[in-house]
Amino acid sequence: MKPPKQKKLQQSKEKQTHLQNPHEPTNTIIKDLLWFSLIATFFKLLLIPAYHSTDFEVHRNWLALTHTLPLSQWYTDETSPWTLDYPPFFAYFEYLLSHFASLVDPTITDLYNGLNYKSPSVIIFQRLTKRLLIWISVISSPGLLIVDHIHFQYNGFLLGLLMASLGALQNGHDLTGGFIFAILLCFKHLFAVAGPVYFVYILRHYCRGGFLRGFSKLITMGVVVIAVFVAAYGPFAYHGQIQDVLKRFYIKTPTASFTGGLVGDSSPFAILPTVTPLVTFGVVLLAILPCVFKIWRNPDPKKIVRWVAYAYTCGFLFGWHVHEKASLHFLIPLAVVAVESIQDAQHYFMLSIVSIYSLFPLLYEAQEYPVKVILLLLYVAIMWFGFSSTFSEKKDGVVSGWIEKSYMVGFVVVEIWGQFLHPLILGDRFPFLPLMLISFYCALGMMYSWIWQLKSIIRSH
């Protein structure tokens, strides 16, 4: 370690350098992000010529309709059988996109000459707009913005590694996926909740092809994973600090108050039994078992994102000492599969609101209140228009069922009580009540999501 004087001197030099050119680190990061984004976009563009359904013509016609006709004729035109049958906000959304489509190829927005137009230009434009929805779902997530850029965390970077690993597994690159996941575990061990899913999937999908070939693949994967851990922990082992490092990972049951500062010391519990880390570990494994059985029977790469997201949901619900931000571990992956069906979109729409709202207490100062509310409302609007555009042929809507709709309205009630009615009626009494209501109400939504995911996994073929 450096002496205190040298350390202070180095910090002073770094501060002076930053003051001289404060924008240089930011500009470098932005350039790196753009570079990696361009690489990822290049590979995604290779999938553009793939299969496309009649929905392409539906949206192309709506682009042409809103671009060609005056607003008064949008809902009366019957030039095509794919008439506009969605609310006005959705029509405005199509109108906005039509200006970009017209620049790509004027025939796309030609109401009469563009019927059943299937040129590469229209296919490319429609593919890009759908991929843009996935990109927006992840990049514009208020959860990441609140946790990483306001509350200050590095979840975006870690989740990027997770998504890279899942992407590799989806595309059949199991060795790469396992390699990246090992790197992720060496950055943050809490991601190991999905370890059983990864292990069984790789064992059944990657290590197949007979005993000898499967065993050789297992050895290969083991060598790669061990090499990552050796690279991470080797220097500490060299200096004899492995035990010190591992001690930091051990979970110790707190002996201090669970609610100190609010209602006094209530540790240990007077009525409820004390829940130990070992108990929660067993419950998490038990909850993941149905998913593991499914993977063992049919290790389908198309479902790996769902399985991993479900594992992190189990860890969030049944794990010990879990932080609110851990909901991003399954929310972000589920954004990828949200465009696969209207049911997935409906589930993600509700879950994203629950997850983001559960993070509200992290920003508790008055000046931060309008920021988090506006972020949530903007994200809800983006998701609403995006999913409505993607599943325009469905009549269920983004929110279906009276239970789901009632639950959504409940968020407004909880927020009004916490921000306005509680101070007005109770004053300074029961200061824990608004936070408790938020936690309890969001817990209901999380339980609903867990049950929904579990049913989806069990019923899948």
Image (tube, grey):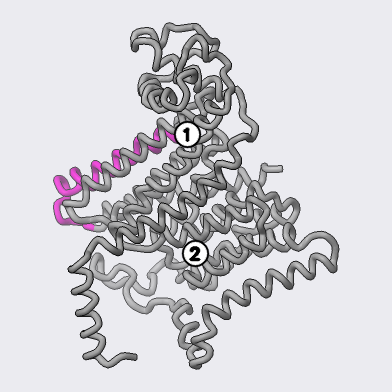
Q: Give the amino acid at mark 2.
A: Gly
- Element at badge 1? helix
Q: Which residue is mark 2?
A: 319
Q: Give the amino acid at mark 1.
A: Thr
Of the two numbered discs 1 and 2 on the same chain, state the one appearing first in sequence: 1
Position of residue 289 in the picture relative to residue 330 (left or right): right
Nearer to us in this view, 445 or 351: 351
Depth check, mark 1 against mark 2: the one in front is 1
Q: Which residue is mark 1?
A: 129
Q: x and y percent of residue 392 in the render?
A: 50, 24
**Residue at left offset 50%, top offset 22%:** 59
Quarter of the image where one finds residue 382 = top left
**Residue at left offset 35%, top offset 48%:** 142
**Residue at left offset 60%, top offset 40%:** 47
Number of marks drawn: 2
Range of the magenta residues? 404-431
In the picture shown, does residue 160 fall above or below 179?
Answer: above
Quarter of the image where one finds residue 32 = bottom left
- Element at badge 2? loop
Q: x and y percent of residue 224 in the render?
A: 64, 72
Mark 1, residues whose alpha carbon is within 10 Å: few (<14), some, or many (≥20)? some
Nearer to us in this view, 461 or 180: 180
The chief SS type of the magenta part is helix
Looking at the rendered image, the quarter that the N terminus falls into is: bottom left
**Residue at left offset 66%, top offset 57%:** 173
